[in-house]
Image (cartoon, grey):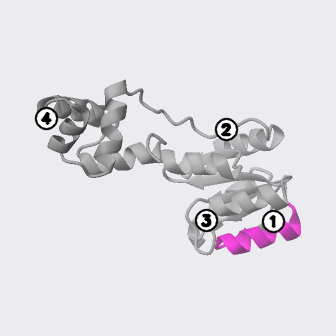
Amino acid sequence: MRIVIADDHPLFRMGLKYALLHQGFDVVAEAADGLQALSACRTLEPDAALLDVKMPGLTGIEVCERLRQTHPGVVSVLITTFAEPAIVQAARAAGARGYVSKETDPESLARQLRDIVAHPDVDRLPQVEVPRLTPRESEVLPLLAQGFSNKEIAKNLGVSPDTVKDHLARLYVKLEAGDRTEAVSRARSIGLLQ
């Protein structure tokens, strides 16, 4: 299987290359940024591109998007340390077929890559858990995102400020957030807010 690997950290890239070579892959190109990765994929048309999510030039997600449009036969797989919900959703929308942790051992990485390339129509990205909000929590959340105080939210919804505090407390738990800013950020990252 012919692979292009792209990561802006030279030591990690070199280790990844040797791990893949040892597992029987043909690493046809290495790239230190997204533009190099895109160019290598367009020129060499590998079976797969293993792309770091955060790179200079173009991110791994942007490379996925462009390859999906111009070279749909190249299977894009992202490699990263964190599976943040917003990144997973962006990766899915860009056409990435897999998402591999940088903490994966070489044998698992090889198995995952072979499986992803053999079955490119199967979505192997992690599922993003979206908490279920009550109707009232769904009304409170956008007002919170707009920066309204508890008193303003209460007045807007015709409830008491204590009731708003209760809804916010439940929202914080559901969103695994410690404060208003974190709750809004988390809600945006999982698609509860636009």
Residue 7 lies, in percent from the top left, at: 62, 66
Q: Earlier in the sequence, mark 1 or mark 4?
A: 1
Q: Is residue 26 visible?
A: no
Q: Residue at x 57, y 46 (%)?
A: 89
Answer yes or no: do the residues labelled 1 and 2 have beta carbons within 8 Å?
no
Residue 35 in the magenta stretch? The answer is yes
| 76 to the left or right of 47 | left
Q: Residue at x 87, y 62 (%)?
A: 45
Residue 124 lies, in percent from the top left, at: 67, 38
Q: Which mark is residue 56?
A: none
User: Is 99 located above or below residue 29 in the figure?
Assistant: above
Magenta: main secondary structure: helix
| Label 1: how many Cα within 10 Å (few below 14, some 14–19, many 20+) | many
Q: Earlier in the sequence, mark 3 or mark 4?
A: 3
Q: Amino acid at mark 2?
A: Arg
| Label 3: how many Cα within 10 Å (few below 14, some 14–19, many 20+) | some
Q: Which mark is residue 41?
A: 1
Residue matched to label 3 = 59
Which segment did they paint magenta?
Answer: 30-45
For label 4, the SS is: helix
